[in-house]
Image: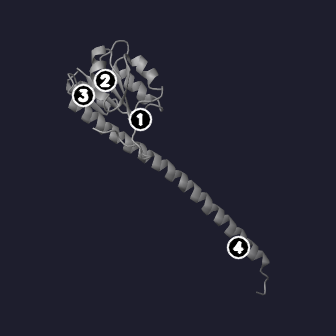
Amino acid sequence: MSALPVAGGGAARPTVMVVDDTPENLTLLGEILMPHYGVRVASSGTRALVAVRIDPRPDLILLDVMMPVMDGYEVIARLRADPETASIPVIFVTALAATDDETKGLELGAADYITKPVRPSIVLARVHAQLELKQARDILRDQNTWLEGEVRRRMAQNQMVQDVSMRALASLAEARDNET
């Protein structure tokens, strides 16, 4: 699996944050991801909410659900409530395999749901797919921003042409005498 290209043409390693309270899970997921991505870890939901604001900001978060103090559901709710972190895709990685748990995670805004024990090929495939989707969304957002600016610029230009035309017509009307 190769690194995703950056919009500018160069290749950069996307950053994946892994959030889990079990050191063994952090190590396992880190070993799976590190050959392909930049990896950052947080051992609790509280730490993740702080670390998500530190550069390099994560392009994707793998988040455990069952953690003490603040579970994954609370973490994703806080991420989605903050405009700075709302667009970061989150994949739940958890031992909770019930359909209700998966449904709850997806309803809270998770992009995907992986059950433990994890299979490396599944983790890599789903991480890669979500990072490609995020890259496409980012490109579309940037293009939309540019297009909105271009529309504003051209509307201002059209307004200026209209104003000049109206002044020219008004001057022409004033200069015209009754006999011509």
- Label 2 and label 1: CA atoms lie apart by 23 Å
Dot 1 falls on a residue whose secondary structure is: loop
Please identify, in this view, whether the residue under mark 4 or under mark 2 is nearer the observer.
2
Looking at the rendered image, the quarter that the C terminus falls into is: bottom right
Q: Are marks 3 and 1 in contact (CB under 8 Å)?
A: no
Give the answer, above or below, for where 21 lies relative to 38: above
Mark 4 or mark 3: which comes first in sequence?
A: 3
Q: Which mark is residue 169?
A: 4
- Label 3 and label 2: CA atoms lie apart by 15 Å
- Residue 130: % across, % down: 32, 37
Residue occupied by mark 3: 114
At label 1, which amino acid type do we have?
Ser
Mark 4 or mark 2: which comes first in sequence?
A: 2
Looking at the rendered image, the quarter that the N terminus falls into is: top left
Residue at (70%, 73%) from the top-left corner? 169
Pointer 1: residues within 10 angstroms few (<14), some, or many (20+)? Answer: some
- Residue 78: % across, % down: 42, 25
- Label 4 and label 2: CA atoms lie apart by 71 Å
Q: Are marks 2 and 1 in contact (CB under 8 Å)?
A: no
- Residue 38: % across, % down: 37, 29
- Residue 26: % across, % down: 31, 19
Residue occupied by mark 1: 87
Work out whether residue 22 can be spotted.
no
Mark 3 or mark 1: which comes first in sequence?
A: 1
